[in-house]
């Protein structure tokens, strides 16, 4: 029995008791009001769901189980997953135990490779990833136990099993997609005994003579792991899981949301924007030229990818952490240097553009600062991972940790099926009149 399983078996009764107690004592307390603007505006700021794995504070960014991200940037993905799920940073023995559990499950069935090889040569890597996860649904232990009549108190056990399996196969599938889709040659197998980050780096097959690419992969998987419960991917996964669809269905659904350009796909868009500028100006342009180019993008009705956020109101600490990595390892890399100059220019441009929007009667831009996607691509690019269509797949391998830990938590405490009430313009007009 894994140490993670034993820990969960110990803490789940406490979660259930706390939930029951809160509901009993405070069930009628109001925690949110909803305005018409919020109902039309993507429910921004409406508190209507529970997530214990992490929190996003507008002025601080991601906080995982009480730990601000930059205070725990040294964690490996296995430690991150354990922390998300249990609220504790594992000791070395527990971390190694989890690495061992993942190693045991690191096997992808042949039918998945057959499907991936049969997909069109120009299929988007995200469509390949989500197809592969969905195809593997037949492996779900949760679905099997459910069909055999499992009782509600046991839901978390096969959900944990499915989660560990998905965690173990995702880097293998993701690395395989890279090699198949971008013609990189044969698949590189998983190395038994290695951790997730190092294995993923190795299976991609990029040169890593000093081991810093593996270091970046661990950091990348750690930084993208979770962003509380309301973002498109987590919220979708939560809703699908709430119908007791298993983790393969729920994670694939969530990752389809991550594939949107306003969400995870922004990291590919962002590097594209930077490279277009480098090409147009034949190298790093002046700040004045970047400013003009940014205004041109905005005035043509497009967003500046990698900037702005639905919740954050400061520079994303994930951007800061990645920036530090680049500064430490390759400060003079031209693409990395370009990201740094853009960071000097774009917030001011967005501020000015926001003022213009307001004058024209439009919404202000709420946040002028970079989000996680603004800089991560330049680090990958440095190591030769230059196919930026692929970047959201990396993001997905990481974000699955948050989605899976939320699924286990939700099944452990018996979270209800999601069913908010929708209304139409007639209802709003009637309410507004009153
Ligand atoms: N460039 C141009 N306009 C922007 C902008 C940007 N970077 N950020 C916000 N705006 C605009 C919005 O499009 C919106 O315009 P409309 O009212 O005309 O629709 C207006 O400013 C108000 O938006 P907001 O309240 O500041 O932000 P939202 O919560 O509506 O949107 C987004 C948040 C992240 C979608 C938005 O900032 C954006 O589109 N940014 C660029 C894309 C991006 O980087 N996405 C990744 C976000 C992080 C993430 O999820 N990663 O996975």
Image (cartoon, rainbow, N blue to C red):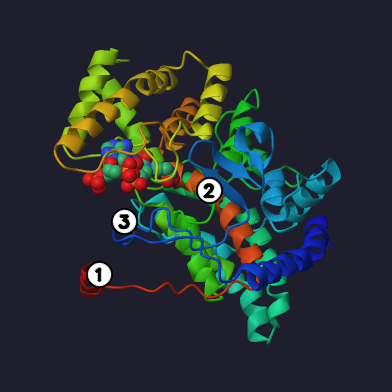
Q: Residue furthest left?
A: 360
From what the image shows, is residue 397 above or below residue 135? above
Q: Residue furthest bottom?
A: 149
Ligand 1 rendered quadrant = top left
Is residue 9 in sight in this rendering? yes
Which residue is disc 3 drawn over? 41
Where, by quadrant of the figure, is residue 221 drawn? Answer: top right
Which residue is disc 1 drawn over? 428
- Dot placed on the residue nearer the N-terminal end, 3 or 1: 3
State the image coordinates of residue 8 (x, y, percent, origin top left).
77, 61
Q: Secondary structure at mark 1?
A: helix
Q: Is residue 344 left or right of residue 89?
A: left
Marks 2 and 3 sit apart, C-alpha to C-alpha, by: 20 Å
Of the pair 168 and 304, the residue shown nearer to us: 304
Q: Secondary structure at mark 2?
A: loop
Q: Secondary structure at mark 3?
A: loop
Q: Residue at x 60, y 42 (%)?
A: 63
Is residue 135 in sight in this rendering? no
Q: Residue at x 24, y 67 (%)?
A: 432
Marks 1 and 2 sit apart, C-alpha to C-alpha, by: 31 Å
Q: Is mark 3 within 8 Å of ligand 1?
A: yes
State the image coordinates of residue 49 (x, y, percent, origin top left).
52, 63
- Dot placed on the residue nearer the N-terminal end, 2 or 3: 3
Q: Residue at x 42, y 72 (%)?
A: 420
| Label 3 neighbour load within 10 Å: few <14, some 14-19, many 20+ | few
* Tag count: 3
Quadrant containing the C terminus in the rendered view: bottom left
Which residue is disc 2 drawn over? 227
Q: Residue at x 16, y 34 (%)?
A: 299
């Amino acid at each position: 029995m894994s140490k993670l399983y034993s820990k969960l078996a110990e803490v789940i009764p406490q979660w259930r008791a706390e939930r029951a107690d809160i509901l009993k004592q405070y069930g009628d307390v109001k925690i949110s009001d909803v305005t018409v603007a919020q109902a039309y505006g993507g429910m921004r700021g409406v508190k209507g769901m529970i997530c214990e794995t992490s929190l996003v504070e507008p002025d601080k960014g991601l906080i995982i189980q009480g730990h601000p991200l930059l205070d725990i940037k040294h964690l490996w993905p296995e430690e991150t997953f354990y922390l998300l799920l249990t609220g504790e940073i594992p000791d070395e023995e527990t971390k190694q135990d989890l690495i061992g559990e993942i190693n045991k499950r690191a096997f992808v069935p042949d039918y998945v490779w057959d499907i991936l090889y049969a997909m069109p040569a120009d299929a988007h890597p995200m469509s390949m990833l989500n197809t592969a996860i969905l195809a593997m649904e037949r492996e779900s232990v949760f679905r099997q136990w459910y069909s055999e009549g499992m009782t509600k108190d046991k839901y978390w056990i096969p959900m944990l099993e499915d989660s560990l399996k998905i965690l173990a196969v995702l880097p293998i599938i993701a690395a395989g997609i890279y090699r198949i889709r971008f013609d990189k040659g044969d698949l590189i197998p998983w190395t038994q005994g290695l951790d997730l980050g190092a294995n993923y780096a190795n299976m991609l097959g990029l040169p890593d003579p000093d081991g810093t690419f593996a270091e970046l992969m661990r950091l990348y998987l750690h930084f993208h792991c979770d962003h509380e419960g309301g973002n498109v991917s987590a919220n979708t996964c939560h809703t699908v899981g709430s119908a007791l669809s298993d983790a393969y269905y729920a994670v694939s659904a969530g990752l389809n949301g991550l594939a949107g350009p306003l969400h995870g796909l922004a990291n590919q868009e962002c590097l594209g924007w930077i490279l277009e500028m480098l090409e147009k100006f034949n190298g790093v342009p002046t700040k004045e030229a970047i400013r003009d180019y940014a205004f041109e993008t905005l005035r043509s009705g497009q967003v500046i990818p990698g900037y702005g956020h639905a919740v954050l109101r400061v520079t994303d600490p994930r951007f800061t952490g990645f920036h530090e990595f680049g500064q430490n390892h390759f400060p003079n890399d031209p693409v990395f240097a370009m990201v740094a100059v853009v960071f000097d220019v774009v917030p001011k441009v967005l501020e000015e553009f926001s003022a213009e929007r307001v004058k024209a009667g439009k919404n202000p831009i709420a946040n002028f600062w970079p989000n996680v996607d603004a800089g991560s691509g330049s680090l990958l690019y440095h190591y030769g991972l230059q196919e930026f269509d692929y970047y959201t797949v990396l993001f997905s391998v990481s974000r699955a940790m948050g989605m899976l830990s939320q699924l286990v938590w939700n099944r452990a405490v018996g979270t209800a099926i999601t069913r908010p009430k929708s209304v139409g313009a007639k209802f709003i007009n009637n309410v507004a009149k009153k």
